Amino acid sequence: MRLSGDWIAAPATQAVCAALTGAGYRAVFVGGCVRNALMGRPVSDIDMATDAPPDAVMRLADDAGLKPVPTGIDHGTVTVVSDGKPHEVTTFREDVDTFGRHAEVAFGSDLEADARRRDFTMNALYADPDGTVIDPLGGIDDLRARRVRFIGDAGTRIREDYLRILRFFRFHAQYGDAESGLDPDALAACAANLNGLDGLSRERIGAEMRKLLSAPDPAPAMAAMQAAGVLARILPGADAQALGPLVHLEARSHTEPDATRRLAALGGADAATRLRLSRAETKALARLQEAAGSDMRAAELGYRLGSQEGRDALLVRAARSGEPLDYDALMQVARGAKAQFPVKAADLKPDHAGPALGQRLRELESRWIASGFTLTREDLL
């Protein structure tokens, strides 16, 4: 089997390969770029592996007129920039001893040993510079079956880095077969290692959850995540029940996936802090949850939140209630987003001032909204 495509044939990428192979070292593509190419998906990031030690990668890249950047040289990783394109080149590694994320590794020359320290079989696929695929651990069969399977013993792989629990569910949402279900051995290992999640940083958990919730349909994976006890561990009080209906409503309304909207549907205690959301994400989530739980009509949602957030509030509200989405309401949201309150503070002066001015403006605005935005400035004054 041989890969092809612009990404692998690009002169900039082949120049990185040539810098290594020309000195007698091996250069292979690995991980996501190989996996995505085999699945017919776009390839963005290019990861490579080599038997050249990191200092040799630095020297050879520099000699070839490329730009080496020691982004993770202690772990064997050098980013080689060729014609403006970054290529992450990592020396073959094998574990000597494991302490969660802080495994003691040794650089080596054995591709299969390098493969065995990776997480899933579909990520342990390699390709030579000419595109010839190398599959040391049966990853192609799993990829064809859209089966996310840990390499070797699932519990051992998880204890090497407990974030792999979340990655397992995320990879199933992105690459797995929902109808076939999740690998039972992996699920059992995830459930047996929940305590390890407590030691993960909130930044890492939040980043992984954003990726999971951005998948086309994360509902089956999230339901399994809840059943295994993982969801309650990282987001107490969250419930995946509304996520499936939300994904359905998104498809019916031609709405692109959005992690914040889906997080609002999950609920959960203190999600912003637990997932270390940004300030903007925190405010957006709070507005969306409050609006979805309110009795504001569609037009007012659009007026107060804008067309996009107003639509999102409607979708979350419908998903939570289990009621069908009123598509006329989506039109009302768009209409409300365009409406402009016709009365200005100056129109009420000098008869009103200070707090009384603000109170009067709010009263008139409420009347105007209740009228369906039909009352004019003259009507209101």
Image (cartoon, rainbow, N blue to C red):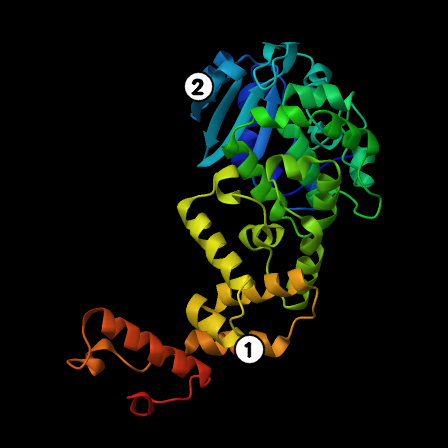
Percent of width and height locating residue 299: 49, 76
Q: Is residue 332 left or right of residue 352?
A: right
Residue sitting at the far left = 350
Exactly how many numbered labels are in the figure? Answer: 2
Determine the residue positioned at 79% across, 24% down: 137
The amino acid marked with disc number 1 is Met
Percent of width and height locating residue 215: 64, 48
Please say if the residues under marks 2 and 1 sit with CB atoms less than 8 Å apart. no
Q: Where 355 sits versus 80, above or below? A: below
Determine the residue positioned at 42% across, 25% down: 65
Percent of width and height locating residue 85: 48, 36
The picture quadrant where one finds residue 35 is top right
The amino acid marked with disc number 2 is Asp
Please say whether residue 228 is visible from this viewpoint. Answer: yes
Determine the residue positioned at 69% across, 33% down: 131
Determine the residue positioned at 63% across, 34% down: 233
Q: Which residue is mark 1?
A: 331
Please identify, in this view, whether the residue under mark 2 or under mark 1 is nearer the observer.
1
Q: Which residue is mark 2?
A: 63
